Amino acid sequence: MAQAGRRPGQTETREEILDAARRRFAELGYDGATVRGIAADAGVNAALLHHFFGTKQRLFAASMNLPVDPGELVPRILEGPEDEIGERLVRAFLGLWQAPEGRAPFLAMIRSATTNEQVATMMRQFLERAVLARVAEARGVPKARVAGIAAQMIGFALLRYVIGLPPLAAASEDEVVAMLAPVAQYYLTPGAEKVRLPMHQPGGLARH
C-alpha cells in the first residue's frame, strides 16, 4: 500500500505544478507569481520545481505550452553584428508564429490579452523580463526601454494574426522586418535616445 499523502508519480506531480503555475501566473502576472508560491499551491518543495523546470522562465513556457525556451532565444538574438540585432529580434519573433505548434498557444494568449487584463500583464511582463530585458542588459541599454519593443511586438501580433488587418496580414517576412526592425534597433542601441527615432520609409507595406 502506498504511503498516505505520497504522490503517485512524477508525471502527476509535474502536472499539478503546471496547474498551480497557470493559476498563479493568471492571478498575479509573471512578476507577481513566485516559485515559492507556486510550489506551495502544488503542495511540493520549491526545489522540486527547479528539478523539473530549472527556471521560472521555463516553468512559465511549460505552463503556457509555449514552444520556446527564453534561454535559447536570447543568445540567437544577441549573436551576430550589432547593427543587425533589430532584424534578428524581429525575425526571431516572427519565427515563433511560423510553426503551427507555436502559433496556437501564442494566439490563445494574444486573444485572451484583449479581454483579460491579467493575461495581458502576464504576457507583457514575460516578454519584457524573460527576453527583452536580458537582451537590453547584454547591449548595455536601460531595461526600461524594452517596453517600447514589447508594445510594438504585441500590437503587431494582434493586428496581423488576430484581427487580420490588411496589409499586415498579407505582408511578407521581409516587409515586416523592414517596418519593425529599425525601431527595435533604435531601442537596443546605446545612446540612441540622443538621436531621432527612425521612421518607416515610404514603400514596402505602403504599396499594398
Image (spheres, rainbow, N blue to C red):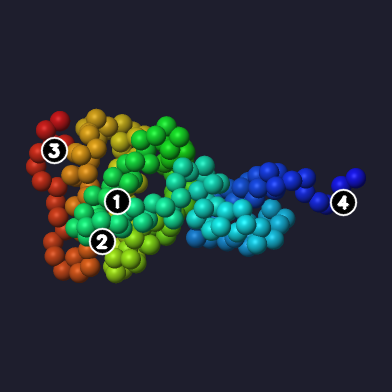
Between disc 4 and disc 2, the foreground one is 4
Per the image, the residue denoted by label 2 is 188
Per the image, the residue denoted by label 4 is 3
- Label 4 to label 3: alpha-carbon separation: 66 Å
Residue at the left extreme of this rendering: 202
Question: Mark 3 or mark 4, which is nearer the start of the sequence?
Answer: 4
Residue at the right extreme of this rendering: 1
Residue 204, numbered label? 3
Left or right of 69, for residue 42: right
Mark 1 is surrounded, within 10 Å at the Cα level, by few (under 14), some (14 to 19) or many (20 or more) other residues, namely: many
Left or right of 9, for residue 166: left
Q: Amino acid at mark 2?
A: Leu
Is 202 located above or below residue 140 in the figure?
above
Q: Are marks 4 and 2 in contact (CB under 8 Å)?
A: no
Is 130 located above or below residue 160 in the figure?
below
Viewer-proximal residue among 41 and 121: 41
- Label 3 to label 2: alpha-carbon separation: 23 Å
Between disc 4 and disc 3, the foreground one is 4
Q: Amino acid at mark 4?
A: Gln
Per the image, the residue denoted by label 1 is 89
Q: Secondary structure at mark 3?
A: helix
Measured as percent of width and height from the top left, residue 19 is found at 63, 46
Question: Mark 3 or mark 1, which is nearer the start of the sequence?
Answer: 1
- Label 2 to label 1: alpha-carbon separation: 10 Å
Viewer-proximal residue among 117 and 130: 130
Give the residue displayed 29% in from the left and 69% down from the top.
140
